Amino acid sequence: MFAAADAADLDDGPRTKKSATERMCAVSRQVRPTGELIRFVVAPTGEVVADLKRKLPGRGLWITASRAMVEQAVRRKLFARGFKRDVKAGPTLAADIERLLVQSACDALAIAAKARQVVSGFGKVSSALKSREAVAMIHAADGAADGIRKLDAVSRQIDGNETGLRDFPVITVLNSEELDLALGRSNVIHAAVLAGPAGQTFLSRCQILVRYRLVDDGDAAEAIAGTPINTPKDAADVDAADEEAADEVCANAHNVERLGRLNG
């Protein structure tokens, strides 16, 4: 017998007229905005499926958008408890979701490129910085430090800011192979996102990916949307952050510090 799930655990289906803007995380039992959660449904085969677009039929279970939270749900068999039935939630579920989030970010980058809201190559990125057309900068996670330093120097010169701290995202969550596939070019190491809705969609997808990777402490249960450029943090810093600091970090939604070290 499975323990009865709380009524708040399961929704009544995707995008109903009474769709809530907040749901309870089945792991932490905290109520959070749905934008900070992942919806899960059960396929006809009994397999647990991540409904990233929130369109799949059936009642849904919600979990904080954190790899650690998903792993904990699998380990504690919370999917079976929440759905009150035998379900298949394999040990690779959390990793599979991360791959889907990476693909989602790559797809959004490809669309932004087709909309001419992305330029790539050191020279074009440098020009976009100098003209202030860039709203975000992308470096391949496996890119050489020298090129990154040079573009940082351009950024500092434009801003007149010796600290090199900027108010737009610097994204390093995709490696060069992923950038190549998304942009349809070879050896892409640097790119810049230009103003426009497609570019903003890409930034939002990166936020989700960063948040999913960044929160690696189940006790923290804080979905970090991005680390502000002017307050660099590493994974250890986030683990040690108190709730007040984490809430402050969440408020700056589009400031994504260099998080390439979280790719592994």
Image (tube, rainbow, N blue to C red):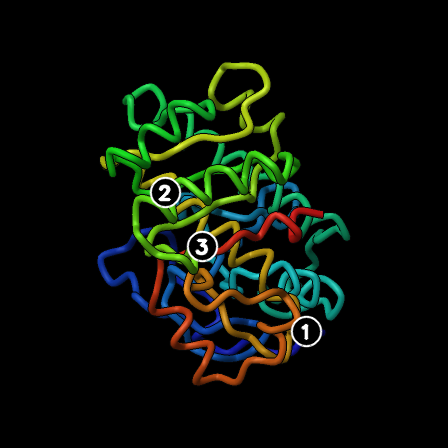
| The quadrant where residue 221 appears | bottom right
Whole-Å distance between the Cαs marked 2 and 3?
A: 9 Å
Q: Residues within 10 Å of mark 2 (few under 14, many from 20)?
A: many
Q: Judging from the image, what secondary structure is the residue with disc 1 in?
A: loop
Q: Residues within 10 Å of mark 1 (few under 14, many from 20)?
A: few
Q: Position of residue 247 (x, y in %)?
A: 41, 77
Residue tagged 2: 136
* 225 to the left or right of 47: left
Residue at 29% across, 28% down: 117
| The quadrant where residue 249 appears | bottom left
Q: Judging from the image, what secondary structure is the residue with disc 2 in?
A: strand
114 or 144, nearer to the observer: 144
* 25 to the left or right of 203: right
Whole-Å distance between the Cαs marked 1 and 3?
A: 41 Å
Q: Judging from the image, what secondary structure is the residue with disc 3 in?
A: loop
Whole-Å distance between the Cαs marked 1 and 2?
A: 48 Å
Q: Which disc, if any, is residue 130?
A: none
Residue at 65% across, 41% down: 45
Query: Residue 248, relative to residue 262: is it above or below?
Result: below
Q: Position of residue 190 (x, y in %)?
A: 49, 30
The answer to whether residue 41 shows anywhere in this view is yes
Q: Which disc, if any, is residue 2?
A: 1
- Which circle's residue, 1 or 3, is located before the other in the chain? 1
- Which circle's residue, 1 or 2, is located before the other in the chain? 1
Query: Residue 75, relative to residue 208: is it above or below?
Result: below
Residue tagged 3: 256
Q: The disc labelled 2 sits on which kind of residue?
A: Ala
* 23 to the left or right of 131: right
Residue at 43% across, 63% down: 36
